[in-house]
């Protein structure tokens, strides 16, 4: 690391749970962020600031003025631009010493395998169940851990999926795959700080996974209610009948 990099990470390196060894580990890591909206914005900003050396940003959407109350990687000047391009400028301004790739496309069955290939970690910052099931299926087949978060209205949730241990449960173990029936932010609304809270926790969990900290959110689902300011954590187990983590993938 250069002297300027050491200065940027100085307060982080002071932590005994990070230190220079951990900082070098972050520098060598490759993280794919799927979605650069309300969750992906704080995730990308904090991981860039933390010094994750290779970030891949994936989102086919463009910035709209209705995004700006919660999607803090973007501003009014970015309205109409691709979110990955807007986010790229913000991240480069924070940390010019990391590698950033951008893909202005939505993740789908055709491109996901190539997008996550070689990654150490995937951050699922998407907002559709079917996309989450897709990410879960392909990441599990590739043996890549996923930190998954969601937020809607005044509530959010977070969990980690780690296929590196075959005894761990996957996303479909806790959320059975069903048809696309969930509501979206455009239909029900969302409080900006709720999405920011979950995205910040997602970034924190990602750093913990990359550094190998114990007691990650594997097999645990954390839920947050802004209305009551209460946290709840539920444990969930591997589903013996799960079609993703108990049987060979058809991907």
Image (cartoon, rainbow, N blue to C red):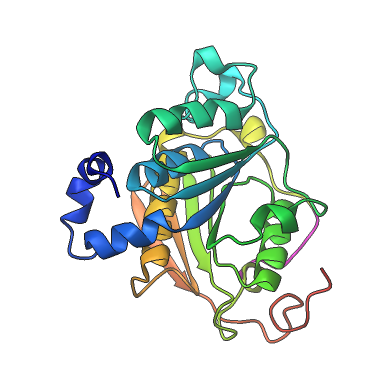
What residue lies at 55% left-to-right and 17% top-to-bottom?
A: 78
In the rendered image, residue 175 lying in the magenta stretch gets the answer: yes
Q: Nearer the viewer, residue 89 or 249?
A: 89
Residue 12, given in percent of the width and then of the height, sits at: 22, 51
Q: Is residue 238 left or right of residue 19?
A: right
Q: Is residue 117 left or right of residue 25?
A: right
Image quarter hosting the C terminus: bottom right
Range covered by the magenta-colored residues: 174-179
What residue lies at 81% left-to-right and 56% top-to-bottom?
A: 179
Q: Note whether residue 39 is visible.
A: no
Q: Quadrant of residue 19?
A: bottom left
What residue lies at 52% left-to-right and 31% top-to-bottom?
A: 88
Residue 31, given in percent of the width and then of the height, sits at: 52, 54
Q: Residue furthest top?
A: 77
Q: Is residue 71 left or right of residue 170?
A: left
Residue 200, given in percent of the width and then of the height, sits at: 39, 46
């Amino acid at each position: 690391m250069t002297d300027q990099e050491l200065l940027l990470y100085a307060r982080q390196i002071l932590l005994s749970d990070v230190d220079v060894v951990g900082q070098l580990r972050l520098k060598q890591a490759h993280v794919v962020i799927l979605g650069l909206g309300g969750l992906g914005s704080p995730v990308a900003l904090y991981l860039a600031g933390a010094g994750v050396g290779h970030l891949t940003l994936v989102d086919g959407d463009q910035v709209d003025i209705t995004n700006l109350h919660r999607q803090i990687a973007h501003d009014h000047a970015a309205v109409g631009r691709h979110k990955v391009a807007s986010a790229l400028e913000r991240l480069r301004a924070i940390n010019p010493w990391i590698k950033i790739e951008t893909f202005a496309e939505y993740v789908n069955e055709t491109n996901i395998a190539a997008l996550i290939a070689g990654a150490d970690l995937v951050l699922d910052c998407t907002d559709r169940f079917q996309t989450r099931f897709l990410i879960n299926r392909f990441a599990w087949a590739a043996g890549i851990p996923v930190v998954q978060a969601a937020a809607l209205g005044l509530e959010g949730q977070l969990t980690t999926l780690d296929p590196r241990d075959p005894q761990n449960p996957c996303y479909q173990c806790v959320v059975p795959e069903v048809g696309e029936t969930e509501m979206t932010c455009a239909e029900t609304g969302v409080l900006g700080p709720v999405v920011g809270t979950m995205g910040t926790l997602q970034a924190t969990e990602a750093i913990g996974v990359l550094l190998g900290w114990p007691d990650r959110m594997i097999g645990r689902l954390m839920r947050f209610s802004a209305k009551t300011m209460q946290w709840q954590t539920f444990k969930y187990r591997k589903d013996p009948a799960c079609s993703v983590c108990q049987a060979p993938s058809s991907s």
